[in-house]
Amino acid sequence: MPYEIKKVFASLPQVERGVSKIIGGDPKGNNFLYTNGKCVILRNIDNPAVADIYTEHAHQVVVAKYAPSGFYIASGDVSGKLRIWDTTQKEHLLKYEYQPFAGKIKDIAWTEDSKRIAVVGEGREKFGAVFLWDSGSSVGEITGHNKVINSVDIKQSRPYRLATGSDDNCAAFFEGPPFKFKFTIGDHSRFVNCVRFSPDGNRFATASADGQIYIYDGKTGEKVCALGGNKAHDGGIYAISWSPDGTHLLSASGDKTSKIWDVNVNSVVSTFTMGSTVLDQQLGCLWQKDHLLSVSLSGYINYLDRNNPSKPLRVIKGHSKSIQCLTVHKNGGKSYIYSGSHDGHINYWDSETGENDSFAGKGHTNQVSRMTVDESGQLVSCSMDDTVRYTNLTLRDYSGQGVVKLDVQPKCVAVGPGGYTVVVCIGQIVLLKDQKKCFSIDDPGYEPEVVAVHPSGETVAVGGADGNVRLYSILGTTLKDEGKLLEAKGPVTDVAYSHDGAFLAVCDASKVVTVFSVADGYSENNVFYGHHAKIVCLAWSPDNEHFASGGMDMMVYVWTLSDPETRVKIQDAHRLHHVSSLAWLDERTLVTTSHDASVKEWTITY
């Protein structure tokens, strides 16, 4: 029973306020790349829904850059590890691994023959290194700074030159190889965030938190001019990128704008105003072929339109923080995936094309813990902001209505027919009817964790931290304890009824899934062993014959009800991150998500 990956909907760049974000370009011009958490994400620049994720770093990755040959990528992480890996195969085999210094790598540059690499960042005693890519032997020294180096670039033609920019407010200029320090450039009055040589090597530019961009001669390092005269931007500048022909420069700033400069005549060609909120600050940019990209503090990637600076051609949205839960729903003949993340953000994805967007309006202000869709086509979500929200999936707009405030933080939500919603909170079970609280069990005598409502709408199963599932019946506007205990093998982590209501699956922290048969008075039907760690999520396939489980062991298993031995094992579904939620689009398509903030679709064959 094999499986194959069908779609990868990648996460957005991980961004931090006041820190520039580097987007790497592809010398062949097809892809661009960036980092989020321990992942390096490669996306097609013409169709960003096509993505690939590299997850071999053990620590958070900061920067990744293609070699000019296009065959390898070098990526550096916060521990100072630099990995050089293959881009041509799906497996991305590791070619070399180095540790140039102990501390965060902030930028990487290659020479045009793809033979030498310069790496800079915040080491303990040194802030940079430049070495041969295949042996790691040094080809010079990066000296001249006394604080963390933020940026490095190498002139892409001989004679080679190297430039760096640092938090000591200086840029430095080197000649080589072997690269030797020539002089310091002290024109800026604040941190130097970015230095870049033009593609032809005639010029290089430095951008700083003081809002200035200076242009220098690429060969001698002599100052040519300051862009915009007095100030290039009203805020700090985080990134610059040259046009392929080297005549123009794109800049991204904390003043919430990006600008295109004509370098030869020193004038602004276009100003792209991205918005008015803090999240519209521009932290990164890339000019590749005809595409101009910028990254906002929201994590969104904007494709800038030179003909209409006021509105981007397209904005790539998604999640930049870990995803906690997802659900699926058919709407107008299309299947959509809804995902909710750690920062309260809910996104919807077209399961075929990967087109996605977030809901309009003000939504949850804290982690979305669980979501489901009720019979009237509303997304019911519960969040750590102590609310349950009902959001219309045709309008996809948070309105003032449909918010139920709870006394205690909710952990899980389930819906049944007749407008019923059951919410499990910390030490409390709440019944809602038609978006209003009508009943609560305030001290159930155990800690309830998860809840499921039988498709008939009469029975509610609540799983507890004490390793039992208790059954309640809905009577009008009350919940009545049936006095029936179903024993799991450990603290219950998820419960789910099959779509036909015949079975109840229960997974627990003791690595076991137990299935109970509803018709036989909830007698134990079968037990499923296989996970090596706590299981965290469950989902039934629409065929009622198979169900999937995901655990802390990073495994996803697809089980066959009648035969616990036949199972599909998806290893490393989201490598280095456990799967936080699962759902089925149809009988053969499973959707998984995890703390790597990406969503994946798998085709399962039995």
Image: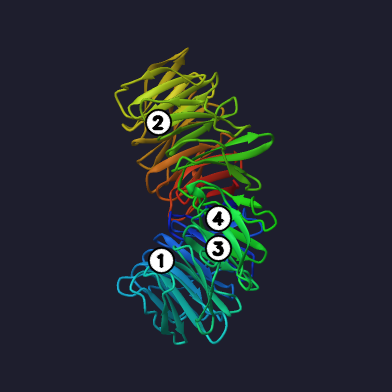
The residue beneath circle 2 is 386
The residue beneath circle 1 is 191
Residue 522 appearing in the image? no
- Counting residues from the N terminus, which is met first, the one under dot 3 or under dot 4? 3
Residue 69 appearing in the image? yes
Residue 366: mark: none
Would you say 177 lies left or right of 49 here? left
What's the CA distance linking mark 1 and mark 4? 19 Å
**Would you call the spot at circle 2 few (<14 residues within 10 Å), some (14-19), or many (20 or more)?**
some
x and y, in percent, of residue 83 in the image: 45, 70
- Counting residues from the N terminus, which is met first, the one under dot 3 or under dot 2? 3
The residue beneath circle 3 is 251
The answer to whether the residues at label 2 and label 1 have Cβ atoms under 8 Å apart is no
Q: Which amino acid type is shown beneath numbered disc 2?
A: Asp
- Counting residues from the N terminus, which is met first, the one under dot 2 or under dot 4? 4
Q: Nearer the viewer, residue 512 or 436?
A: 436
The residue beneath circle 4 is 257
Q: Nearer the viewer, residue 412 or 160?
A: 160
Would you say 149 lies left or right of 51 here? left
Q: Which amino acid type is shown beneath numbered disc 4?
A: Thr
Q: Secondary structure at mark 3?
A: strand
Q: Which amino acid type is shown beneath numbered disc 1?
A: Phe
